[in-house]
């Protein structure tokens, strides 16, 4: 089966067919290219989806992802990110192994096809030229034969005419002989041209055209094989990523299996456990004896009883409700029914210990005394761990500076060892400050751990767990008062509460000096301070720096005497005053 023998007369149709084959190949290339674009778009959408649901760093949302179900969700997002990466691999491999290769092959194919059909047209032009030569020789031979016949007839006519001179007859005879000779020459030329044409025609249809058509057939078959190989590659590219995609899906399934509902329930306990004991039973109040009426220590009313009676009942009570109950502001306030007071207790939350938590964006007291005991213990422990990490960083920095100083001592040409003394002293001072901070927070932590209640110990009083702190930083934050034996006296608290609130407010807001300015900063971007404690800034705005970034990504700034707050450190360019107190000098 050969196109050269079977399709020897189908030159034009073969030209159309091979062009159609190239069009099909280009259509397949376009198909693969669009598939790669879809894969890239799909991978991008998957990555954006994964990024969209990732918890934001340094946010409350990130803290909520400590539960196993949320961790499994994070693992799912990470696996989906890897899953998107495999679709990018599919796109890259299809582009490099199919699109690029086939595009180059199409160009080569077009050149080869052009060359073959050029040879075919050249062969056709040659045979057509031979045919024209044959036709010309044939017509000349025919013309010479006719001229020879006419010359012969003219000679015979002249020879038969008795009136014609002998010279004219001789002239006619010579002319007839000349024409006959020319006819013979034309005949010989025609015969030679005919033989040559037949030879060229045989070569054309049995040698040249079959050879050219055979090359065209091989070219077309290579194109068919190439597009088949590309389709196999198309499938292999997908098949190669299936194991990795399977691992991604296995990772999602494994993350789902790692969800532990009991562990999550325990985390909820650790997150919200206050450390208080449940309130004791409310004792019966006998109103039939108005003059000798007494109430239990755990009563929700504000009535005042005899101090001796309070001491008597205090030893029998299981615990007090005072950390949760909103006390009456006036001693003359009328008693509410017990049902109303109980509803108020069930819906109330622990009161903030002092007004410090309302200052400058809601920042709580340094010792976290506004939190319940258990949550306060966790916060203090977290603070101690953070300070220890900062100490370790400072110590690493000190070691690095010391090594650099030793290098400078051994190689003075590299630098002046004395230039590092100031930095070493500064780092040493920072370490000492951090150690003092650790000691302070460890003291508070030890105090809190010693006051946490133990279930079943009736001797431990609720008041002992939540009494006012004796440290100087929270002396003014006391919200309630206790009797010498640790019991709560409502009368004293009611008499002094308004004075204490006014004193606290004055101490925390009016008498505290503002933080000094340690430098300036320029806003690189606009920031909308929507969260509590933050401040909004506009791009290009110049503000004052009052507190450096402590490693949490936030810098404290001031616009004027009334406006100050935190902004992301990456949003501003800070210029610290080297002479300002607390400003660090970087080398």
Image (cartoon, helix red, strand yellow):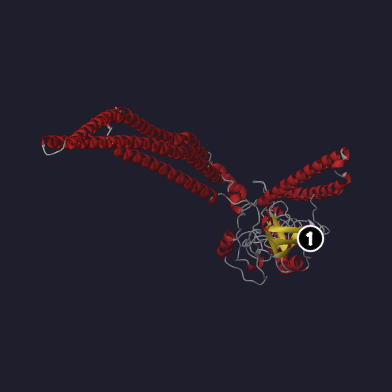
Whether residue 459 can be seen here = no
Where in the figure is residue 389, as x and y percent of width and height?
73, 45
* Residue shown at the point (21%, 37%) measured from the top left: 143
Extreme-bottom residue of the structure = 332
Task: Please state if 446 lies on the left or on the right of 252 as rendered.
Answer: right
* Residue shown at the point (88%, 41%) measured from the top left: 412
Numbered-mark total: 1
Where in the figure is residue 31, as x and y percent of width and height?
40, 43
- Give the position of the N terminus as an image quadrant: top left
587 and 494: which is toward the camera:
587
516 and 157: which is toward the camera:
157
Task: Please state if 377 lies on the left or on the right of 258 as rendered.
Answer: right
* Residue shown at the point (56%, 65%) measured from the top left: 340
Task: Please state if 14 lies on the left or on the right of 143 as rendered.
Answer: right
Task: Please state if 137 lies on the left or on the right of 434 as rendered.
Answer: left
The residue that label 1 is drawn on is 518
Where in the figure is residue 508, as x and y percent of width and height?
75, 65
Quadrant in which residue 15 is drawn: top left
Task: Find numbered disc 1 in the image and state the secondary structure of the residue it sits on.
Answer: loop
Whether residue 184 can be seen here = yes
Where in the figure is residue 186, as x and y percent of width and height?
25, 32
- In the picture shown, does residue 200 fall above or below 281? above
* Residue shown at the point (51%, 48%) measured from the top left: 44
Disc 1 packing (10 Å; few <14; some 14–19; many ≥20): many
115 and 130: which is toward the camera:
130
């Amino acid at each position: 089966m050969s196109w050269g023998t079977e399709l020897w007369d189908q030159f034009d149709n073969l030209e159309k067919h091979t062009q159609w084959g190239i069009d099909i190949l280009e259509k397949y290339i376009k198909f693969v290219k669009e598939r790669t674009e879809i894969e890239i778009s799909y991978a991008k959408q998957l990555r954006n989806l994964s990024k969209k649901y990732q918890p934001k760093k340094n946010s409350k949302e990130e803290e909520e992802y400590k539960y196993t179900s949320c961790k499994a969700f994070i693992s799912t997002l990470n696996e989906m990110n890897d899953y998107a990466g495999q679709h990018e691999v599919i796109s890259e491999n299809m582009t490099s192994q199919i699109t690029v290769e086939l595009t180059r092959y199409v160009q080569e194919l077009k050149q080869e096809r052009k060359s073959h059909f050029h040879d075919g047209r050249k062969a056709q032009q040659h045979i057509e030229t031979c045919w024209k030569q044959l036709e010309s020789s044939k017509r000349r031979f025919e013309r010479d034969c006719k001229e020879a016949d006419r010359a012969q007839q003219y000679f015979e006519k002249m020879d038969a005419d008795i009136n014609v001179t002998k010279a004219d007859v001789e002239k006619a005879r010579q002319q007839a002989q000349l024409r006959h000779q020319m006819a013979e020459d034309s005949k010989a030329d025609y015969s030679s041209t005919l033989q040559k044409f037949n030879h060229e025609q045989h070569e054309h249809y049995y040698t040249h055209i079959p050879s050219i058509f055979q090359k065209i057939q091989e070219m077309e078959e290579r194109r068919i094989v190439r597009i088949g190989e590309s389709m196999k590659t198309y499938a292999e590219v997908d098949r190669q990523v299936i194991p990795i995609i399977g691992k991604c899906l296995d990772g999602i399934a494994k993350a789902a299996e790692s969800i532990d509902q009991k562990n999550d329930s325990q985390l909820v306990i650790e997150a919200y456990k206050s450390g208080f004991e449940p309130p004791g039973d409310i004792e019966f109040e006998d109103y039939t004896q108005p003059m000798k009426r007494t109430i239990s220590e755990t009563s929700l009313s504000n009535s005042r009883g005899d101090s001796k009676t309070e001491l008597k009942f205090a030893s029998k009570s299981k615990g007090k409700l005072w950390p949760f109950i909103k006390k009456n502001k006036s001693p003359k306030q009328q008693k509410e029914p017990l049902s109303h007071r109980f509803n108020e207790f069930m819906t109330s939350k622990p009161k903030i210990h002092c007004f410090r938590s309302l200052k400058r964006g809601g920042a709580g007291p340094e010792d976290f005394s506004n939190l319940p005991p258990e949550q306060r213990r966790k916060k203090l422990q977290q603070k101690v761990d953070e300070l220890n990490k900062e100490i370790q960083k400072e110590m690493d920095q000190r070691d690095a500076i010391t090594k650099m100083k030793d290098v400078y001592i051994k190689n003075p040409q590299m630098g002046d060892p004395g230039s590092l003394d100031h930095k070493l002293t500064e780092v040493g001072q920072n370490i000492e400050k951090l150690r003092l901070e650790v000691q302070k927070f460890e003291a508070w932590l030890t105090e809190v751990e010693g006051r946490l209640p133990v279930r079943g110990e009736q001797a431990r009083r609720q008041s002992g767990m939540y009494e006012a702190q004796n440290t100087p930083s929270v002396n003014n934050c006391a919200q309630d008062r206790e009797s010498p034996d640790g019991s709560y006296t409502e009368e004293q608290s009611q008499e002094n509460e308004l004075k204490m609130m006014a004193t606290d407010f004055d101490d925390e807001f009016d008498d505290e000096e503002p933080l000094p300015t340690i430098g300036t900063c320029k806003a690189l971007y606009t920031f909308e301070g929507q969260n509590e404690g933050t401040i909004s800034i506009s791009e290009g705005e110049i503000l004052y720096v009052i507190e450096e970034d402590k490693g949490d990504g936030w810098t404290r700034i001031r616009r004027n005497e009334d406006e100050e707050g935190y902004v992301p450190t990456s949003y501003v360019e800070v210029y610290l005053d080297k002479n300002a107190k607390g400003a660090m000098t970087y080398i």
